[in-house]
Amino acid sequence: MQRKPLNIETIKELWSQTYNTEGKPDWSHIFKYYHKDVVFQDTIQRIEGIDEFMAMCTRLTKRTQQLNMEIVSIAQNGNVILFDWIMTMMFKKYPSTPLYGSTKLVISEDGYILSQRDYYDLWGDIFNNIPRFGKMYRRFWSENLDKKGAYMKFELPDELKFITNARLPQKQSNESMDGKVCVITGTTSGVGYEAALQLAKAGAKVVMIARNKDKAARVYEEIRTLSPHEPAYFLADFTDLNQVAAAAEAILANYPRIDVLINNAGVHMTTRQLTKAGHETAFCVNHLASFLVTNLLLKRMMESAPARIIQVNSEGHRFNGLQIDDLTWENRRYKGLQGYGASKTAQLMTVWEFNDMLKDTGVTINAMHPGAVKSNIGHNNGKLYNWYSRWIIQPLLKDPKISGEAIYYLASSPDLDGISGKFFHLTNEEIPAPHAMDRELGKKIFQLSLEMTNRK
């Protein structure tokens, strides 16, 4: 297979050629320049091996109707080639989407690309518009660019380390969960489904709370084949706190001990919607429902100690949006990211309060971000959101299996014995956003949560 020598001119020619002879987006002509053990990494993923790299490129080109790459500047130093680019994509009939970035290629002695590192700011436009966070985000980058706009060497401040934490090595567990009763919400897809499978494989007695009976029954049958202990499921719509309370009471009536509670059920809303009881939907599902389940099962878990509570939270708490005097968004325009952020901030704040309550009880409570993974969250929204999720967001996300493995680690590993009141990015401890650490406001949110769930 004839190859041109890799240099500045070759790269400019090859990377700017984005269509095949049939006029369709295609980058297959560059594959022969890559080493069979190539390592590719960008903002959201790390890929090893030529087969995985080709599959990733092919997925991208197949999704696009138009694809253009403009190389703005390029330089070479020995076996390293660096270039800045503007990539413009059009997905079917929708407007083109520009992405600005740079690439570092490391070339082997025999002329193959050993590694490719792409740098681009996928979330900059989103973060830039978030109140408080956006200001901090702009200040950080203004302080870490030189006069020519190049990145200087820096260490991310604690508030921004979540950007790089996703690439840290993850801790693993092979501990047995034989016979341990693990209650988990939202198990019919995504993160909760993978967590339920991992726990079942470890021998746990999995007790699910789910909304859809047919889906819950299918997962139930699958789990039966994985664990020697009979699983169970209870039904509840998490927008209805009466149903949530009924499911929790049924679990208490059937299980004299509870070893692990994993509050995973969640929702993302793009428009303001209220539940029948008048709660903003995301706040109800993501925070109030999990708060209620935790509160109702708490005494049983203390009786079962040692026991663990895991709140599946999100880096989305950094979007904030929490206003204690306007939890239903009556006096301001509803924004989906901030509505989500408000619910996750409230959940985190109550984790710290529960942690204080549980001191010396043998029950621990921690929160975790499950990673940027594929899930069905947000699919309750309209056609535009679902199109955007399917074609733009989901292809960039990872397999939720990593979330299930992380939850299993947090639920089982001896490393977590006695560890409580922490926030984890998958399995690595992380410092939450400063606003989520406001203990004075957190105490008020905790009391309001008690009142809103009819638990004085």
Image (cartoon, grey):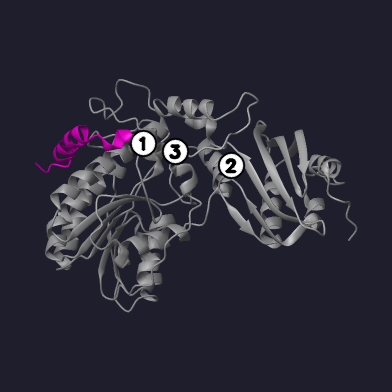
The amino acid type, in three-letter code, at marker 2 is Ile
Query: Where in the figure is residue 443, as x and y percent of width and height?
Result: 17, 36
Label 1 element class: helix
Magenta stretch in the rendered image: 433-456
Q: Secondary structure at mark 2?
A: helix
Circle nearer the N terminus (3, 1)? 3
Give the residue at the far right of this rendering: 2
Residue beneath disc 3:
160
Is label 3 in a helix, a strand or a loop?
A: helix
308 relative to 401 in the view: left or right:
left
Res. 91 visible in picture: no
Q: Earlier in the sequence, mark 3 or mark 2?
A: 3
Left or right of 8? Residue 94 is left
Q: Give 7 or 300, whichever is nearer the viewer.
A: 7
Q: Is residue 375 left or right of residue 435?
A: right
Write the residue at 42% across / 62% down: 171
Give the residue type at disc 1.
Gly
State the CA–CA distance, disc 2 to disc 1.
21 Å
Q: Which residue is mark 1?
A: 341
Residue bearing the label numbered 2:
392
The label nearer to you, 2 versus 1, is: 1
* Figure quadrant of residue 416: bottom left
Judge the density around disc 1: few (<14), some (14-19), many (≥20) Cα neighbours within 10 Å. many
